Image (spheres, grey):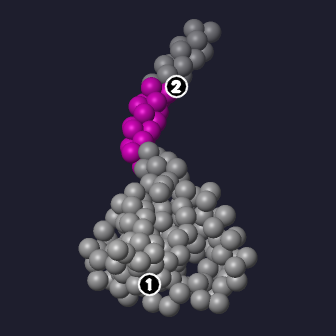
Amino acid sequence: MKHIGTIVREKVIDELKENISQSEGCFFVNFNKVKALSISQLRNNLRTTKSKVYVAKNSLLSKAFDAKSEAVASFINGETAIVFVYDKDIVKTAKALVDFAKENEILKIQGGLLKDKAVTSADLTALAKLPPKEVLLGMAVSGLASPITGFVSTLNQVILKFLWTVEEIKKHKETNKK
């Protein structure tokens, strides 16, 4: 017969594995000495980005990530919380997390996993500096449309020059008749 503690640990590990499989990525943060009110504020900020903060013992985190890279082991030290990201736009969550870490310097971003690729805290800071997805898409469309716009503008100038020339010829003929 299993002890209640063992059953609870297995349940936590199963829940962590389920969150890992459902998420687009996860970030590891050290929240040592961060006040409970600040953690609640972080949870509320991250809820708007379709993310959630999960806190568990490091040994359980390690077991849940056993199939992942060894880099995860370096992220799990001290009082570690995981931020699971469920939105495809991971940049929103990275921005919210980096902004919160700037306001609360005690919170340390240790790194993360984007799918199965480990990223450092410097990578996450760089990711947070990217413009939103909509702006990036707009920049791409603008870049694709730019040559076409230039071509149309050139064609328009040719037609306008032709019309100006015809108009000048017409004026010249009218002045010669008089």
Q: Is 166 on the left-hand or right-hand side of 46? A: left
The quarter holding residue 66 reads bottom left
Q: Quadrant of residue 171?
A: top right
Nearest the eye: 40 or 91:
40
Q: Residue 145 colored magenta?
A: yes
Q: Residue at coordinates 26% horizontally, 73% vertically from top-left?
A: 67
Q: Split into 4 quadrants, where in the image is the C terminus?
A: top right
Magenta-drawn stretch contains 149: yes
Callout in the foreground (2, 1)? 1
- The picture places residue 151, in percent across and down from the top left corner, at 39, 37
Secondary structure of residue under mark 2:
helix
Question: What secondary structure is marked by label 1?
Answer: helix
Left or right of 137: which side holds 95? right
Q: Residue at x 58, y 75 (%)?
A: 98
Q: Residue at x 41, y 72 (%)?
A: 7
* Residue at the spot of label 1: 58
- One can see residue 69 in this view: yes
Segment colored magenta: 143-161
Where residue 106 appears, as percent x and y from the top left, is 63, 88
Residue 104 location, x and y as percent? 67, 82
Position of the N terminus by quadrant? bottom left
Q: Does 54 sit above or below residue 177?
A: below
Snapshot quadrant of residue 4 = bottom left
Q: How packed is label 1: few (under 14 Cα within 10 Å), some, or many (20 or more)?
A: some
CA distance for labels 2 and 1: 78 Å
Specify the amino acid type for callout 2: Trp
Q: Is residue 28 visible?
A: no
Give the mark nearer the N terminus: 2 vs 1: 1
In the picture of the structure, the residue carrying the numbered disc 2 is 164
